Each structure stands twice: as C-alpha cells, then as structure tokens.
Image (tube, coloured by chain):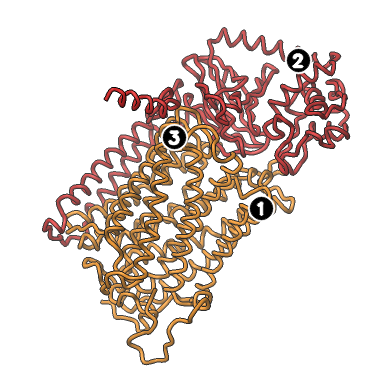
Amino acid sequence: MSAVADTHSQEHHHGPAKGISRWLLTTNHKDIGSMYLIFSFAMFLLGGSMAMVIRAELFQPGLQIVQPEFFNQMTTMHGLIMVFGAVMPAFVGLANWMLPLMIGAPDMALPRMNNWSFWLLPCAFLILVSTLFMEGGAPNFGWTFYAPLSTTYGPPSTTFFIFAIHIMGVSSIMGAINVIATILNMRAPGMKMMKMPLFVWTWLITAFLLIAVMPVLAGAVTMMLMDINFGTSFFDASGGGDPVLFQHVFWFFGHPEVYIMILPAFGAISHIVPAFSRKPLFGYASMVYAVGAIALLSFLVWAHHMFTVGIPLAGQLFFMYATLLIAVPTGVKVFNWVTTMFRGSLSFEAPMLFAVAFIILFTIGGFSGLMLAIAPADFQYHDTYFVVAHFHYVLVPGAIFGIFASAYFWLPKWTGHMYDETLAKTHFWLSFIGMNLAFFPMHFLGLAGMPRRIPDYALQFSDFNMVSSIGAFMFGVTQLLFLFIVVKCVRGGEKAAAKPWDGAEGLEWTVPSPAPYHTFSTPPEVK
Amino acid sequence: MRVHAKRAVALAAGLLSPAVVMADWTMNMAPGVTGTSNQIFSLHMTILWICVAIGVVVFGVMFWSIFAHRKSQGAKPANFHENTVVEILWTIIPLAILVAMAVPATATLVEMYDTSESEVDIKVTGYQWRWRYEYINDDFGYFSSLSTPREQIENRQAKGENYLLEVDNPLVIPVGKKVRFLLTANDVIHSWWVPEFGVKKDAIPGFINETWTRVDEPGIYRGQCTELCGKDHGFMPVVVEAVPEEEYNAWVAEQRAAAEAERQLTEKDWTLEELMERGEKAYASACASCHQPDGTGMPPAFPALKGSQIATEDMAAHIDIVVNGKSGTAMQAFGGQLSEVDLAAVITYERNAWGNNTGEMVTPKEIFDYKNQE
C-alpha cells in the first residue's frame, strides 16, 4: 500500500519486512493505520450482517426467521461490534495514518505500543465473536448490558464478554496515550496549538476522553465479573446493592463514549468541507473551543439515558439542563461548516458528497437528540424506536459517513491512485437512500409506540418496519461496492498527485502520493 | 386489457392483503387521554417545530450554496473565515431558545413527579414475562399475561386486531381519579409504559418507584414493557381498562369477594381431576413460556419436566423447587406469586401430564403447611 524505499535519505533504509512478519511486527504508523482500517471494515461487515438478520426478522410481524433468544444475541452483538469493532478502530486507523503526516512527525511517539494496541483487537474480537458458539449463546442483554439481566440472568458466555471488553479497553487506552504523546511532543517547529489542523485537535480531545472513561467501563465490567463469579452484590438489591448503580457507572462511560465516536469525524469534516469549498474553515478558534466545550459537557449529562429510572427530581432537572446546553456548541460547529461552504467555490466529488450528507443528516440526528433532552417528553421516547432512529442518524450518516468521506479523501494519499469516482458516487447515493429509508421511518415507529429490542410487533407497526428493512438491505448490500472500490484503488487507477484536491491544505499534502514508508524524517518548517 | 387489469388487481390484493387491513402510517405521537400526556404532546410539538425552523434556515443556506456557489458554474471563492459577532449571535440565540424550552419542560416534570394525594394505589410488579397488579388497599391482586395465541405468533393463524397487545386480565382503574402506581420487579429491570397516559417508569428489583396518572376518558389503553428483560421482552404487554367510578367500585367489590373465596378454596378437599384441570391452566400461564406446553423445556436453561426425575420421583424436591425456586438460575420462587391452590394444582399437573402419570397429588392445605413450616 505504501512505497518501499525512502527517496531522499542516504542513511541505511531497508524497506518494510516481507511476508507476515511485516504485519505482525510493524511499528510503522502507516502499516498499523492500514491494519486498523481493514480490521474495522471487516467488523463493519460482520456487525452489518447481524443487522441484516434483525431487519429480516422485523420485515413482517410474527416470528419467521429467528427465535427471540437469538434475536437478542443479534441486537447485542450488532451494537458491540459496531461500537467497539467498527467505529472506534476506524477512527484510530485514520489517526494512525494521518496524525504524524499532519503534524510533520516521522511516526507516533510510541511505535511498539502502537503495534500492541492494534493486535489486541483481533484477540478481543475472537473472544467476543466466539461467544456465539458457546453453550447458552452470546451476550443477549443489549450492548448496554444492564444488570441484573447481564449478571444474575446472563448466559455463561458473559464472563468471556467481560474479558473481551477489558482487552479492547486496554487497546483504546494505550492508543489514546500514544495520540496525546505524539500531538503534544512531536509537532513540527512553528506548529503552535492554535495552528494545529482540526483533525489533530479533535483527536487530542478524544484521546483525553478515552483515558478518562475507558477505566470507568473497566470498573463497571469488573464489578459485573465479581457479582457473577465471586458472590458480590454491587448490582443486586438482595445483597444490599443497586441495579441503578450499574447504569450510572455505565453511562458515565457511555456518554463520553458517543462523543469519542463522533469528534474525530467532526475533525475530518473540518478538513474536507474547506477543501471542496476552496475556502478556509470558518471560525477556526470557535471550532476548537466548541470541541473543548462539548468534551467537558459530555461528562455532565450521563443520566439523560436514565430519565425513567426514578432519580430524584433535582437530578432529573440538572441533567435536562446540561443536555440542552450541549446542543449549543454542537450547533455552532454546524453553522460554521455551512458558512464555510457559503460563497465558496464548490465541487462535489465523493468526499464532499459524504461530508455534505454528514452535515445535514447528523444535524437531523442532533434534532432528535434535542427532543430526547426534554425530560418529560423523553418519558414517551425512551426505549422506543425514536431513540434507535436518533442514534443511528448520528452514528451512520455521522460517524460512518465521516469515515467514508475520510477514506475517499485520503485514499489517493495512501495508495497513490485515484479511486473510481463514478463508482464512489454510486456508493454514496445508494448508501444515502438506503440509510434514510432504513432509519427515518424509525422516528415514526417510536412516536407511534413501538419499543426497542423486540423481535415481533403489533400490527400497526408493520408498514414502516417493512420500509425500514428494505432500506437496510439496500444499505447493507451497497457496502460491498465500497469494498470493491477500495480493493480496485489499492491495485491500480489514475496516478494521484501529492495534492489531488486543489483546495486542500496541510502538511500531509506536501509528501508524495503514495506517502513513502518513512516521511518527515526531518521535520518541516511551519510558518 | 381487462383480463390483465383483473389479474393485476388480484395479485396486488394478494400481496397486500395482510397489510392492507391494518395499513398504518402513523407518524406522530398521540396527545393521549391525561393532562400529563397532553402536556408532553405539547412540549414535543414545540421542540419539533423549533427544530424544523432551525433546519429550514440552516439547510436552506446550505442548499442555496450548493446551487449558487458551484465551481462548475464559475463561482469564485470568497476569502472570509471568521466573524466574532456572528459567532456570538449564533451561540446566544440558540441558548435563549433552549432556556425558553426548559421553562415549560420543568413545570411539566415537577407535576409528573408529584405523586401526593392519590385516590387509588396499585402495586405493579414486573416479572419475566408478565405483570402483576396488586390493589394493595383492597387485598387482591392478579397476574396479567399476554393472551395472543402462539399459533398467531408462529404464523399458523391470522393475526388478530390486538396482536401482541392483549392480556388475560387487564388492569382496571377509575376514570377521573388520581391513581398512584408503585413499581418494582421480581427479577430483572422491566419498564411499565402506557403511551396514551404519558406514563413510563422502570420497575427495578429490590426498589420501589412511584408514578401516577389521572385518566380523563374511559377506554382500553395498550402499552408494552420498555426495558429489555430477556427473551420475551416483546411479549409482556400492558393493558389498562379505564372505567367510570361506579363501574370501578363494583368491579373492586367483585374482586375482593373472589379473592376471599380463593383464600377459602385452600381449605376445601380437592380431587385429582379438579387439581389437574386447574393445574393445566396455571401451568400454561406461569410455566409454559420456559418449560413449554408439552413439558419438553429448552435445555440447558429450561429443563424438561416430561419424564424428568423431579416430576416423577422426588416429591419433596419438586415442591421445594416450585415454591422456593433455584438460586443462580432463571427458576423463580413461585411460592410468593401463586396461591396455594395454584401451587398444588401445578405440581399435581406436572406429576401427571405428558405421560408422567405418577397418580400423585398435592393439596393446597399441604402447600400451606409446607410454606408455614419454613
């Protein structure tokens, strides 16, 4: 995927190792970035297949394809694999590839730890996916694994699920340490903090969020492990514990987690929109402050996932106000992206198509989020398909389209070839239509009264469920086209210039395409 | 031409017939039948319109740019890239809008939390996978389980109008009175929701939650469990009948009398046949979802009873496990859920059904004594 020899150095420079050792032992950020991206796409297809099972069962009322027990395993594993196996590793892959290039550094600060951070993931997911074949089946209690359903009433595989989470957590924490050490220590001379590209800023802040909350998740699952295997009662009322404690600890992790899953996308979009508008990002400083504000506020809103649990009124009000507040900096970012486009000179290659769709559809997800923040109204939305619609809008056209936009934007840099623009546009339009058909009707289903996590439903929900399933199948199949496009681009295509996008800015566009195996062995000067 | 048209219609009708009878493209929440549900509806519509307005403006600007500022149409890029005044404005204005929303939302929430001065109190307990309603000031209670036949769920029979939203014993409450609900759970977290009341509250094992409602219009209202609680989470609906006060009082009197009679049934002498008849019903309602109607269970989680040691040999162990459950498994302690009559009936049934044929029976009195010796 990248060239073997460094063209300008006279030092002893072997190319990368040959064969499987190259990939097992590499400490090169480009190799590791590629592995993360390939892993995440494989997980995306796996989690996506589970979604296809879910939507196939929900195509019509009645139980046709799977039993409720297995359906619950599908919903659980779909969520876990997408969150921890697809979205998060994809962003780490983008970070690995692009952060050193953007700051003019030769590699990440801790290259060997970088290798280990990656290789922990296939191990963790082997354990997680193997639970499907264990007696009693895979975890079946939702990706949010509330106690006591997941403790007293969980299948035997739950302990393996906990191990997998621990391993993923270690991977994330080490990756985050690496990101912070790299950004704080290895920027080229002249690149002050307020001159860093937005993708670097958003990843810096995401890394702090990861270090803050992954240990909290580890705490939650360790308490679960204790309750299940060692007779403790953290979450068991009969022993003096409290099931709601689980929810507080989980969501203290869970809310910053969703910002971990979107901030890097915000960063990437902040590169792509200016490039294809041929105009600088509007309000750089505000954009940085907004991300900081979102990150800080993200620690103060967790109980908006728990409005129906029975927390005291004062708590309920506090969390409602804090949640409403977080809409403000998010809105500022959207306004700034639109203003960047305004009076620009726009073109709509695939990265820009995904970026524009991101802005519109993520904002729609934000609107449903604002509605959910109104605590009294949330009593009607909570645990219904309205919530499912909300988070799929912020995650699919949000995080996932952000990743697709980034992939198309940076594929020329990674591979040295332009991807097939016609196929990419096809991928975009089919994804856009499929995604909206799949998830927009879910708003209506939720408002009409359909709960979440059910394998069968009352007849008044039939029509929109059928539409949703058709959209989901369309979206799912289309992702195979993306696989084709990427493989085709890796193998060949029109030769890419160092800067294939005339409106793009940044150090990453000063190195050749494909980027040499070792770049910036000498730091560049930043004015 | 006419032949083709007829065939096309027949084809379309055939394809659409299951759907067309119940075709439903409902897009919005219903205002509901309580003060709370109407307030919530109003908040919901307000925030929705605010979002629509913001969306129209923001997307409008964007679509305008997409149309008018294209490079392919010769647009040249402007150079501006910051404006502090504008940034401040579009921070302050949304903030003001949100503060404006927070005021009525706070008022509604305060009211939703005020469970004082209720006129009827009902304890709602979530079980895997049904609800139990206890009228705690009137000494009676009952289970409310899904009554949709398995044949409909398994697509062997056409689905009825209230498919998955019908129960054997609905909750009955009076119209126009403040009804307070005390919620808890027997096993995992469940959640009790009636959309038309605007009432949802989690039912948490070991804790008691409170909520209330005052229904303005008589009718039958249907909701569902809204917290994942295991395999039949989608199969434990909530059905509430709101009736005029007089009708409610009459119904309560009947229920009290029936409960008293039931308590006295414990004393009577039962025959094997009577216990079997009663036991078959009790088994269907309380046991069949796990151990299956034919007693074959779903091992390893739900053992078979047909031909099992526990149902054909060790009577004492059989009584113990039904009354006290088995900790660390999903087998609940039914001693606290079923009456002595039903416990005796169910054990008797299990010992004689599906070819088990032990000829043994347990009487309600024996169960009563068993429970009291512990």
Residue visible at 49% across and 50% down?
A49
Secondary structure beneath label 1:
loop
B13 or B96, nearer to the observer:
B13
Q: Tell me the crowding category of disc 2: few under 14, some 14 to 19, or many 20 or more residues within 10 angstroms, Cα based.
A: some
Query: Residue B51 sits in which quadrant?
Result: top left
Above or below, A182 relative to A91: below
- Rendered position, B182 above or below B297: above
Subunit of label 2: B
Of badges 3 and 1, nearer the viewer stands 1
Q: Amino acid at mark 1?
A: Met
Chain letter for the orange part = A
> Closest to the observer: B9 or B201?
B9
* Residue A446: numbered disc: 3
Q: Position of residue A479 (x, y in %)?
A: 40, 54
Specify whether disc 2 shares its chain with disc 1: no
User: Which residue position is annotated with label 1?
Assistant: A134
Q: Is residue A225 in sight in this rendering?
A: yes
- Whole-percent x and y of residue A141? 59, 45
The part of the image, by quadrant, that contains residue B371 is top right
Q: CA distance from mark 3 to mark 1?
A: 34 Å
> Which amino acid type is shown beneath numbered disc 3?
Gly
Question: What residue did someone put label 2 on?
Answer: B262
The span from disc 2 to disc 1 (Cα, nearest Å) is 46 Å
